[in-house]
Every structure is written in C-alpha cells, then in structure tokens.
Image (cartoon, rainbow, N blue to C red):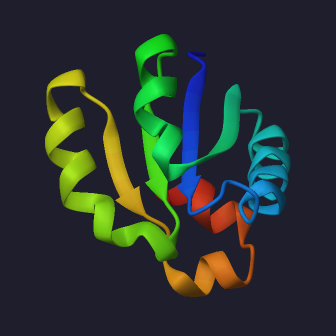
C-alpha cells in the first residue's frame, strides 16, 4: 500500500492538531499508511518545496485561499479541498480523512 501524505492548513496551525490526531487514529484503524500533519497557511509553500504531499486540506477559516492553492498545485497533482465547518468544529477525524 502506498503511503498518503495529508497536510492540513489553518490560520495558525494549532487548531488542527486535535483533528490531525483524530484523523491519524482513523487511518490507523483502517490500516491506511498515512502521514497527517498541520501547518499555518503561510508556511504551506515552504513545506511543499521540501516535502511531497498528496492532499492539502484547508481549515474553514482559510477557505478564501482555495482558488489560489488549487491553481498553484494543479500542475503538481496535489488535491486541494476545504474541511467542512461542521466536521472541523466536531473534530470528526474519520469524516475529514474520507474527504482527503
């Protein structure tokens, strides 16, 4: 099985840490080889220059960056999406993992 790398980006990178933990637990439960981590949105470009990422999920508070990242990452074959407010607020790790 291929390892999947999922990066979550939010305003400061801290509010998603619990969501990362819940997503990782859901991935482990399903037997998925996944690396999931969170960063502040301003650091996304730096991380992408040094690390291969398969999926970028934006927190609801930075959804305004969706078009910018979608356009920028299309040629790198990186999927980009926004975490729904309800799933983010409920810290629904399994649902956000399914979105990724």
- Residue at 49 percent across and 75 percent down: it is 60
Residue 20 position within the rendered picture, expressed as x and y whole percent measured from the top left? 75, 51
Up/down of 8 relative to 45, above or below: below
**Depicted 60 relative to depicted 19: above or below:** below
Quarter of the figure with the N terminus: top right
- Which residue is at 47% across, 26% downward? 46
**Which one is in front, 68 or 88?**
68
Q: Determine whether, in the image, residue 67 is placed left or right of residue 20.
A: left
Pick the residue in front: 11 or 23: 11
**In the rendered view, does 68 fall on the left or right side of 48?**
left
Report the label total: 0
The residue at the point 63 percent across, 76 percent down is 88
Residue 68, position as x, y percentages in the image: 20, 52
Q: Residue 12 location, x and y as percent?
A: 65, 59
């Amino acid at each position: 099985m291929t390892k999947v790398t999922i990066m979550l980006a939010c305003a400061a990178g801290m509010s998603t840490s619990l969501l990362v933990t819940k997503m990782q637990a859901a991935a482990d439960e399903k037997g998925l080889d996944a690396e999931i981590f969170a960063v502040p949105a301003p650091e996304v470009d730096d991380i992408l220059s040094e690390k291969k990422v398969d999926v970028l999920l934006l927190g609801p508070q930075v959804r305004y960056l969706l078009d910018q990242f979608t356009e920028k990452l299309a040629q790198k074959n990186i999927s980009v999406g926004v975490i729904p407010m309800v799933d983010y607020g409920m810290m629904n790790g399994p649902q956000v993992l399914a979105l990724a």
